[in-house]
Image: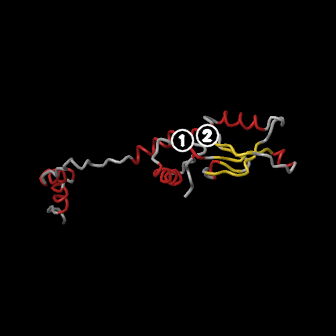
Amino acid sequence: MTNMNLNDAEVVVTTQCQIDNDTHEGDWFQLSEYGDTCEFHNACYSYFINENNPVFRFLAWENIPDILINKEWFCPNFFEIRDALECLEESDVDYFMSWCNYHGHNIATDDPHLLVSNYLDNHSSHSVMESESVEVPDDSIYQSAYYSYFDFERYSLDIFSDNYD
């Protein structure tokens, strides 16, 4: 399964100009140092201050699933996703990603806070406290509910009536 510890995410950033010149100048950026995409991009622009309108390329990354990054693209919602996933237990993150895939949600494009909220609503645990005792009601309650829901008398009259000639 993919590693989704986005708090430890890091990426090597360079520019297309550096690749074209075969200098491959770039550096690792710790994404935990940035609060949003704007801060991250400003840091990248500051690093490549000598280039006019640099086109960023991402040569390597760690702790980022491939759905959120490739060599030419960095998910603009990355920091929102990172913040939303903090609401989940670390052990639930992989289950959350499987749940997103199963239901056709794309974590890179859909609202991550809404997805996490829906996941938590559908997967919240309702465990019984050990000190609580579970009372099982009388069978007569179940029987009366069963017989009132299924009107057997009406159907028995339809099936066993004398009008089968």
Residue type, mark 2 in image:
Asn
Q: Quadrant of the N terminus?
A: bottom right
Give the residue displayed 49% in from the left and 52% down from the top. Answer: 99
Q: Quadrant of the C terminus?
A: bottom left
For label 2, count other residues whose C-alpha is less than 10 Å away and answer few (under 14), some (14-19) or many (20+). some
Above or below: residue 82 compared with residue 156 = above
Secondary element at image label 2: loop
Counting residues from the start of the chain, the first of labels 1 and 2 encountered is 2
**Identity of the amino acid at label 1?**
Pro
Which residue is disc 1 drawn over?
Answer: 112
Front-lying residue, 55 or 18: 18
On screen, residue 51 versus residue 127, left or right, reads right
Residue 115 x/y as whole percent: 50, 43
**Which one is nearer the viewer's eye here, 140 or 69?**
69
Quick check: marks 1 and 2 in contact, CB under 8 Å? Answer: yes
Q: Residue at x 76, y 43 (%)?
A: 56
Front-lying residue, 4 or 135: 4
Report the residue marked by disc 2.
77
Q: Position of residue 107 (x, y in %)?
A: 57, 46
Q: Where does the image place residue 27, in percent across and percent down from the top left?
A: 73, 45
Dot 1 alpha-carbon crowd within 10 angstroms: few under 14, some 14 to 19, many 20 or more: many
